[in-house]
Amino acid sequence: MSRIARTIFRVGPLVFAASLLLGSHEVALALDFPGPAPGEAKGRIDGHRLVLENEVLECSWTVSDGRLKPELLTDKLSGTTLNLTKSECFQVVLAKSPRAESQTVMASHLSVVGEPVLDDVEPSASSPRAAERAGARRMTVDLASGDGNPATDYLPEASAEEIALFQAARAHLPSTVYDTAEWEAAAGTAALTDWWPRVVYLLNRGGRFSSTAYDNEKLKNKWGTFIGMYMEKVATTKNSMTGTRYGGLGRYYPLADARGLPIEDAGFDLVAITHRVVEHTKSRTIANKWLREVYPENFIQVSRLDAARLGLATGDRVRVESATNPTGTLDLGNGNTKSMAGLVRVSEGIRPGVIAYSLGHGHWAYGASDIEVDGERIAGDPERGRGVHLNPVLRTDPTLTNTCLSDLAGGSAVFYDTRVRLVKVAP
């Protein structure tokens, strides 16, 4: 006679081993099930789904994003199914540890370690658990708490000298930005460690990095979801301009126009790219005076090697020109022009052959200049026009003539394929 399902959790100081059992053998001390014989216990692992069942019950769990969650509980005799997806497998209440008050840890807060294991439990008359006394099918899932194992998971503690260096490097900051006592208190303590020296160790290094990326020939950290190496929809779609099919595999596409004809802009030896800064988004935040005070003007980032080759230094002013805008100016259509010029900042942080500028500056409209509405002159704010924005320099597609180069597969504008040159101008 089979036994009903039972779930047990072995709780260690740092690792939870969740064992899900369904009994299938008869022993003298077991409690008989008051109904038809449940039959043999079975278990299976279907990808991320874990199932234990017999002829009476079916229980399922899911492992998704490294978390264990209950899914369904089905009473096969009545045909009733309970949806447990909003429930927890279990919860553990830590009595006043590591905080001053008690803390509840849900099963879904813990990370799944390794792969679920399905095995048989041989009957043991001396076991305190009924399912183990009867024998069972067992599904085991190891769950680790966020604190991990001090011996293998914790970062080293920063030395007193390193902590002193960390504090000295922030001595110039106001207390609203950095206060040692507040930061140390925020780091907190646990039963096994004081976190502050370990936090300093991490911040001084800019993050935590694995010492080994591979496990033999395979990546140590597996990608847990689908990777689209081949896209059938792309492979069966034709380019409306050329009549040829797109490739279904990722590959390098040389710089080309809408017809796929190569573009060679001789004499323009730099590639212009864009990026963002935390102080501004794209364009609208330039209207915020407080943000302008923090970051009033952007710059054109140039590598040290390119700067030396072109005779440029930080603070020099340059005009950016391209094959389809060889003068580096924008005709505003009202008798005025806007020069695509900005300040140089020489940097080791950019690849030679590339220049970069942040978005959000260099407005010629949006309140940056005077306008007249119904005969009334509305004064502009020249602070909104500081810096540079290079959209007017973007390479025009020679086939389409009225738009910039585009991604032939996706159709979006190409912001990173314009070849440019820098011309030094007066400040």
Image (cartoon, rainbow, N blue to C red):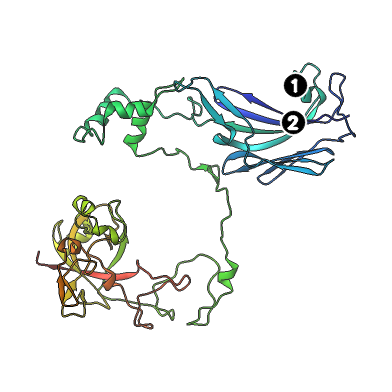
Above-or-below relation of 172 to 301: above
Between 56 and 376, the one lying in front of the other is 376
- Pick whichever, 301 or 17, lies toward us: 17
Q: Residues within 10 Å of mark 2 (few under 14, many from 20)?
A: many
Residue 172, percent across and down?
18, 35
Question: Please, is residue 18 above or below residue 374 in the view?
Answer: above
Question: Can the viewer see residue 114?
Answer: yes
Q: Amino acid at mark 2?
A: Leu
Locate the C terminus and report the quarter of the image it occupies. Answer: bottom left
Q: Amino acid at mark 1?
A: Arg
The residue most toward the top is: 126
Residue 166 horizontal/vertical position (percent): 27, 31
Judging by the rendered image, the residue that carries numbered circle 2 is 21
- Residue at 53%, 80% (x, y): give it: 244
Label 1 sits on residue: 129
| 406 horizontally vs 39: left or right | left
Quadrant of the snapshot with the N terminus: top right
Q: Secondary structure at mark 2?
A: strand
- Quarter of image, res 54: top right
Q: Are marks 1 and 2 in contact (CB under 8 Å)?
A: yes
